[in-house]
Image (cartoon, grey):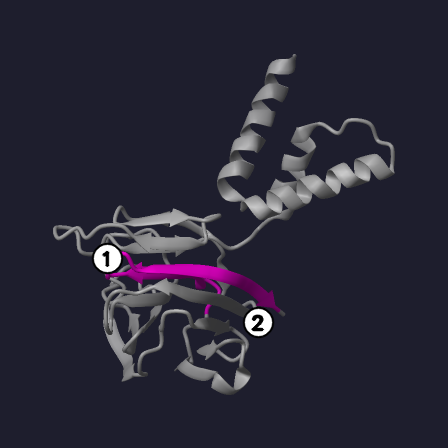
Amino acid sequence: KSMPFRKSLRFAFNKAKNEIPTCFRYLTNGYIRDQQNKLSLGNIPPVITYVCLLYYYDGEYFTTCNEDLRISNDKRTIRKIKNNLFRPWANRAIGNMWVPSMSNKIAKWKFIINRSTGGLNTIYIALISIDKHLDKEFFAYPICDAPIYTVGNGYTVCAYDGNHANQCDIGPLFVVGYKFSIILNTKNSTICYEFDDDITTRQCIFADIVRAESVKYKIAVCLKSLHAQIRLIEFAELS
């Protein structure tokens, strides 16, 4: 009779450990232990903590990456660890959160460049609408008519159905030590960026993005320079 319980406990523990950042696990466990003492609840089984975490937490972090990258620090830091000359596209990581394009929300991803060892066009951040093809370049997506919007430290590219549009020079966007945000606004169909949460630096880089019931977006990062490193500091979803 205890076998299903042990299996469910092991499943909940492994899932929480692999998918939920350490800080949230510690915070939730501390809160439950605090309530246990205040309310004299006796010993609350560890599985309760994991069940609470799995029910509540739906956060942003990087879930998968190609072999040239490594994900660390609660799945929010990405580092380029090698250059594969035979697989030059093996350099991107994919986020967790999908944002429906018809949701009328504002989603904001805040990053910091910890290290960059190249010049222009070595770091890219994209909002993608399909994450099944990690073996495709961010600029060549003739897959399922999937829109993708890419911001690079040098220029921006909008690709839709394999066609390139809205390419423009926006200067060196990604500078080591700078905190910057990519902002998806499905209310007014725009993608913007800003520095250090300063709204006066906000600039719209894509207007009239594709919106449809079947389209949703998530974040992706591409590092082309060896030892480059980027960290997701914060994610917020506003209504």
- Where's residue 152, x and y in %? 31, 72
Residue ID at (27%, 56%): 227
x and y percent of residue 189 in the render? Answer: 47, 78
Q: What x and y, as percent, mark residue 163?
A: 24, 73
- Residue 232 within the magenta-colored segment of the rendering: yes
Q: Which residue is mark 1?
A: 226
- Quarter holding the C terminus is bottom right
Q: CA distance from mark 1 to mark 2?
A: 38 Å
Magenta part mainly helix, strand or loop?
Answer: strand
Q: Assign a secondary structure to mark 1.
A: loop
Mark 2: secondary structure: loop
- Mark 1 vs mark 2: in front: 1
List the residue tagged with mark 2.
104
In the image: residue 197, left or right of residue 85? right
Local crowd size for mark 2, using a 10 Å CA cut-off: few (<14), some (14–19), many (≥20):
some
Given the image, on which type of amino acid does mark 1 rest? Answer: Leu
Q: Is residue 185 left or right of residue 174?
A: right
Residue 108 falls within the magenta-colored stretch:
no
Give the answer, above or below, for where 183 lies relative to 114.
Answer: below
